[in-house]
Image (tube, rainbow, N blue to C red):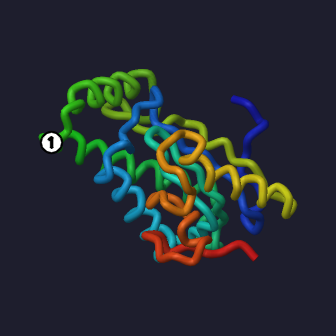
Amino acid sequence: MSTKYRFSDNEIPHFVTLSLVEWIDLFSRERYKEIIIDNLNHCIKNKGLIVYAYVIMPNHMHMIVKSGGIQSLAELIRDFKRYTAKILYERLKSDHKESRRGWLMRIIEEEAQKSSSNKKFKVWRHESHPVVLETNAMIEDRLHYIHNNPVRSGICFSAADYKYSSACQYSGEIGPLALSFMD
């Protein structure tokens, strides 16, 4: 395993990327993005996760986060991924409105066969690619990257218009996540 990407100092914000296995576009459906929002809010309220910025794209998400001290950031991300994988898998398994359910389930279950940690299902790729944001320039660069990701992908024309991003909150609107703002 590479040593390039590692969680380090919990006092410093990290840029993380969480990607779905085989880049499946599970988050093209609002009901699955809402599971992510609900669980991020739970982690903020109950586990000490501090979220400064985020975006949920169809097949991955980016965040600028740090730990509030209850758990290490690595543990928080691990637990978030473990729990949301279980909830997403169970929801998908029972979601008869999902036209791609068979295809998505097959990929999630086949990916589990390649995993040493879970033989039943695997929703998230193992890597989180944490990058320590040590300078204001690094923070500003990643904040801009996160907020403009939906625009670059053609999902919306204006970053502030995308519901599943902190861009709207940085523009003064109310968003779905209990966000902390960068100083």
For this view, does 176 lie left or right of residue 73? left
Q: Name the residue furthest left.
A: 96
Locate residue 27, reporting x and y percent. Answer: 38, 44
Give the class, few, some or many, for how many residues have Cα within 10 Å of label 1's Cα (few <14, many ≥20). Answer: few
Residue drawn at (66%, 65%) of the image: 66
State whether residue 128 is above or below residue 66: above
Residue drawn at (64%, 62%) of the image: 65
Locate residue 144, reporting x and y percent. Answer: 70, 55
Residue 133 lies in what quarter of the image? Answer: bottom right
The quarter of the image holding the N terminus is top right
The quarter of the image holding the C terminus is bottom right
State whether residue 43 is above or below residue 152: below
For this view, does 10 lie left or right of residue 80? right
Residue that badge 1 annotates: 97
For this view, does 135 lie left or right of residue 82? right
Residue drawn at (44%, 61%) of the image: 163
Front residue of 149 and 19? 149
Front residue of 21 and 122? 21
Q: Disc 1 marks which amino acid?
A: Lys
Residue drawn at (64%, 49%) of the image: 16
For this view, does 92 lie left or right of residue 136? left
Q: Secondary structure at mark 1?
A: loop
Locate residue 100, reporting x and y percent. Answer: 24, 30
Q: How many marks?
A: 1
Locate residue 51, reporting x and y percent. Answer: 59, 67
